[in-house]
Amino acid sequence: MKVLFATGEAWPFIKTGGLGDVAHSLPKALSKMGMDIRVILPKYSLIDYKYKSKMKHIGHTYIKLAWRNQYCGVETLEYEGVKYYFIDNEFYFNREKAYGEFDDCERFSFFSKGIMAALDIIDFVPDLIHCNDWHTGLVPLYLNELKRSGIYEETKTLYTIHNLKFQGIFARENLGDIVALPYDSYFREDGLKYYDAISFMKGGINYSDHVSTVSETYAQEIKTETYGEGLQGLFHLYEDKLSGIVNGIDYEIFNPRKDKEISTKFGQTKLDKKVKNKLALQKELGLAVSEDTLLIGIITRLDKQKGMDLVAHILQELLEKDVQIVLLGTGAQDFEDLFEYYSHIYPSKLSSNITFDHALAKRIYASSDIFLMPSLFEPCGLSQMISMRYGTVPVVRETGGLKDTVEAYNKFANTGTGFTFSNYNAHEMLDAINRAIELYSDKKRWKEISIRGMQMKNSWSQAGKSYKKLYSEIVK
């Protein structure tokens, strides 16, 4: 099977969020399974020169976009066994950031048209084009236009939603005939209304052969008003072509037995060594060094979507217990200020790290006893899976991918991999934390729950098998 994976970002070339990880790890996993899968993305000026210097120019064409006639170059590079293609245009992609520019509508209309033009240049006729998030939402539309001309008639499309909150909504003003989509009314984040606007994501949903999200539970949640972001009716309409597949994590990057970025390596058979990481981290961050004090890790974006208002509500109460908290993340100023304030009030119990540090994140995963992730909504989530990989027990809200990947602990049957709570309520969350604290005193059972988490199969090879099966069902 031949697949073209279309994305607005892919690590290590460009990454702004989880999509960048998926666009690297999933094609790599599928390539190892023998699939001819290739990735295409914009050639941003932000891409490191060490990669750009190795790209080879294949060819170019010109694309008509409203009143502009734009150059579209195609370059290629192979990385970790996967062939990558880059759409080259200085006018659109020589910018200080990947997204968030005033002309994003035009930029990613061009990118979508560029993908279709690139197929002729690279001489590749895919059985399926896998489109991701709003940046490639117009690809199914442009492909359908080509099909009416008798081109790529057998090519199918899968459209994957990684975060429904960001839909690529643009006002009609000054767009001309850039996008051949119907205009509609949409609310902006500030509550004002666009009366004439388009949604790239809505286009992708309408014109693709199949729609997927990044967890089975989230695929059901988005059909409700609470999680549907205004598109719940559309998901009900297309529920026969809607499904969910949980993302994976890279077991080569996140491996406590081989990880060079943590203090002490450990595994399921040497779980007793895990505590050495906690002692080292406590010393590093100026916390009271104590093997018996339960350490709570929080690695997150500091905003309400990640449940930080719940944490803020009970933070004082939580710090009065025999626990320590290590926070890593940036975000809303009020949450940053709150954690900084309490880190001064409780310097031996709370370490507030308002930054992003990949190596420190690894040390927190490896050192913590529990990992707190109380999201308001979570399409998939990776942190809960990474924490279990390092023997750290997650405390999560039962939503989206968190519900699909963390089995609630049952003290009577001694089963489960973490502690969960259902309603978006601060004291329900605190109750789940208290249940974890209670079990922590039973070292035998705590070790058992940690090992069960480490035994979970959350690798990309597992997710890859599910995608391979879905691809086959779409193209049959």
Image: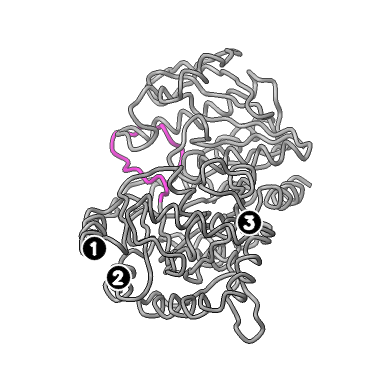
Q: Main secondary structure of the magenta part?
A: loop
Residue named by callout 2: 315
Q: Position of residue 126 (x, y in %)?
A: 70, 33
Q: Which residue type carries mark 1?
A: Tyr
Asked if the residue at tag 2 contacts the one at tag 1, i.e. Cβ–Cβ closer than 8 Å, the answer is yes
Q: Amino acid at mark 2?
A: Leu
Is residue 77 one of those drawn in magenta?
no
Question: CA–CA distance between discs 1 and 3?
Answer: 39 Å
x%, y% of residue 442?
56, 79
Q: Secondary structure at mark 3?
A: loop
Identify the residue at horizontal 58%, vertical 47% (top origin).
254
Q: Position of residue 441 (x, y in %)?
A: 51, 78
Q: Which residues are magenta?
A: 166-181
- Label 1 crowd bin: few (<14), some (14–19), many (20+), radius 10 Å: some
- CA gap, disc 1 to disc 2? 8 Å
Q: Which residue is mark 1?
A: 342
Above or below, 123 against 322 in this view is: above
- Nearer to the camera, 206 or 99: 99
Q: What mark, if any, has residue 33 been given in the picture?
A: none
Please name the residue that numbered disc 3 is placed on: 245
